[in-house]
Amino acid sequence: MGDANPQHKQQQQQEHIQQQQLPSILSAIECDTALGLFACYQRNTPLVLAAGLPTVHVGELVDISGAQGCGKTQLLMQLIALAVLPATWTPPSATDAIPLRGSATPVLLIDLDLRFSLSQLAAFMRAHIQLCISPTSVSQPSLTALINSSLSRLHICRPTSPLQMLATLLNAPKSFILEQDTLSSLVVIDGYSTYYWFNRFDDYDINKSSAGQPSMHRAIARALRRLKQEYACGVIVTRGERVMSRQGDFVVSRDTVWTSLVDRFVMVWKEQEKVRWKEL
């Protein structure tokens, strides 16, 4: 027999996260620094570099969408590489600083796909550094030291349930953002449509609270908005999205709630084995 009081059921759902002990939920999430994990994945990986990169500003959310295998993760790795690398670097044998176009920004990566490759990220970083310093010759130990110091700015969490995902977002200010020396941080969510409940954003409006609306959805949406507005975080999400071709143009399926959260949409596709992107 169904619940005769939908509003009471919704209230119970909304209080679920409060009834749980947040530390207990967080303790079940696999977290580590990228530097600590990198030692397990040191190998070279083929690169498929995108032409240019989208920009991500403080306090905005950028949606990177595209079909599976189109290169979203490769594009994301390049964005993370530039975020954690310093703006300039002076090799041990050099006297002048070399521009690397990085920003030395702390990055919190929430890996929902559980497939983010640190070896590929390190390979992207190495390729970018070598391109910037060319034709200067730098020893491999020096490059590795720079990559390791940059990876120390990257913190990785791998939640495996909606509740863990919400707990990660709610705890981010205390456990990560406020611990940094910089004024802003970057929060990256890879595989945003991994859980089916992410695809149901059109079922509700986060500005309303009518009975029957999924409380987990509202909580996640509000947590993302809080990171943007209260903590001036840049936020990037990658989503597998249905893509339609209309006279050669790409149209991403959007709903009103997600549109209210996202500041810019970026469409990604692969053309002749190269990753392409355009802002919609």
Image (cartoon, rainbow, N blue to C red):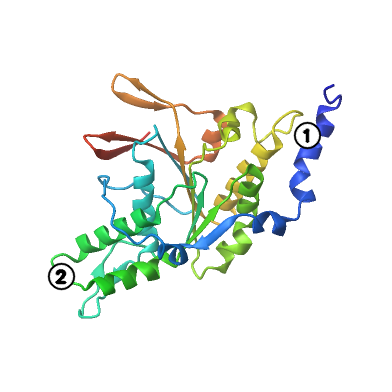
Q: Quick one: quadrant of the C terminus?
A: top left
Classed neighbour count for the residue bearing mark 1: other residues with Cα under 10 Å, few (<14), some (14–19), many (≥20)? some
Residue 166 lies, in percent from the top left, at 64, 47
Q: Residue at x 64, y 37 (%)?
A: 217
> Mark 1: which amino acid?
Gln
> Mark 2: which amino acid?
Thr
Q: Nearer the viewer, residue 22 or 117?
A: 117
SS at circle 2: loop
Q: Single out the residue that lies furthest toward the top.
A: 247
Q: Earlier in the sequence, mark 2 or mark 1?
A: 1
Q: Nearer the viewer, residue 29 or 4?
A: 29
Q: Which mark is residue 136?
A: 2
Answer with the quarter of the image where residue 210 lies.
Answer: top right
Residue 212 lies, in percent from the top left, at 74, 28
Q: Provide the residue designation for mark 1.
A: 10
Residue 177 lies, in percent from the top left, at 56, 62
